[in-house]
Image (cartoon, helix red, strand yellow):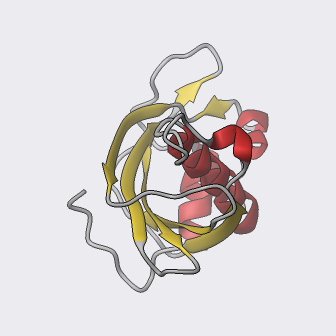
Amino acid sequence: MNQRITETDLVTTLRVRVRFSEMDALRMVWHGNYVTYLEDARERWGEEHGLAYMEMYRNGFVAPLYDLHLQYRGTAAMGDELDLKIIYCRATGAKMVFHYEITNTRTSQLILTAESIQLFTDLAGEFCPALPPFYEHWLQQHQLL
């Protein structure tokens, strides 16, 4: 998680309430559910910034997860409200890099930080080392090239 976050990065925050079904036997959020929270944030980010999953698909590409790092810093319990902050980080090549922070809204405690890398593949699953045209256009629109 060495990405430098700048003021030009695209950010989205999603608020979720921890549900009973997300708890483990210790009455805290089961660790695997944090990955689902990250994906929910990534989906919202794409909708807000014009890079939704279905938009990629319509352009003949998908962006599967290549690498994911999580650092647990606290716990959350049923009924807690969490802010899921996702930050797009500039990267070279045909990939998307995101930094995440999950914070308890009541206590302001940082619960988790994470970083993900997604690589572009065509619909047959072949890795695309060059920027997909739709992504290059998106980068240009957001002055990120």
Q: Nearer the viewer, residue 135 or 72?
A: 72
Q: Is residue 114 depicted above or below 118 in this figure?
A: below
Q: Residue furthest left?
A: 2
Can residue 76 be seen by looking at this rendering? yes
Q: Position of residue 29 (x, y in %)?
A: 54, 46
Q: Nearer the viewer, residue 69 or 134?
A: 69
Q: Nearer the viewer, residue 11 or 90?
A: 11
Q: Is residue 17 depicted above or below 12 in this figure?
A: above
Q: Nearer the viewer, residue 113 or 26?
A: 26
Q: Position of residue 84 (x, y in %)?
A: 57, 65
| Location of residue 129 by image quarter | top left
- Specify the quadrant that holds the C terminus: bottom left
| Location of residue 110 by image quarter | bottom left
Position of 71 with respect to 25 (left or right) is left
Give the residue displayed 26% in from the left and 63% down from the top: 3
Position of 143 with respect to 45 (left or right) is left
Can residue 94 be seen by looking at this rendering? no
Give the residue displayed 41% in from the left and 86% down from the top: 7
Q: Position of residue 63 (x, y in %)?
A: 55, 35
Q: Position of residue 70 (x, y in %)?
A: 34, 47
Give the residue displayed 53% in from the left and 72% down from the top: 104
Q: Residue furthest bottom?
A: 7
How many discs mark residues in the rendered view?
A: 0
- Specify the quadrant that holds the N terminus: bottom left
Q: Residue furthest front?
A: 26
Q: Is residue 28 depicted above or below 145 in this figure?
A: above
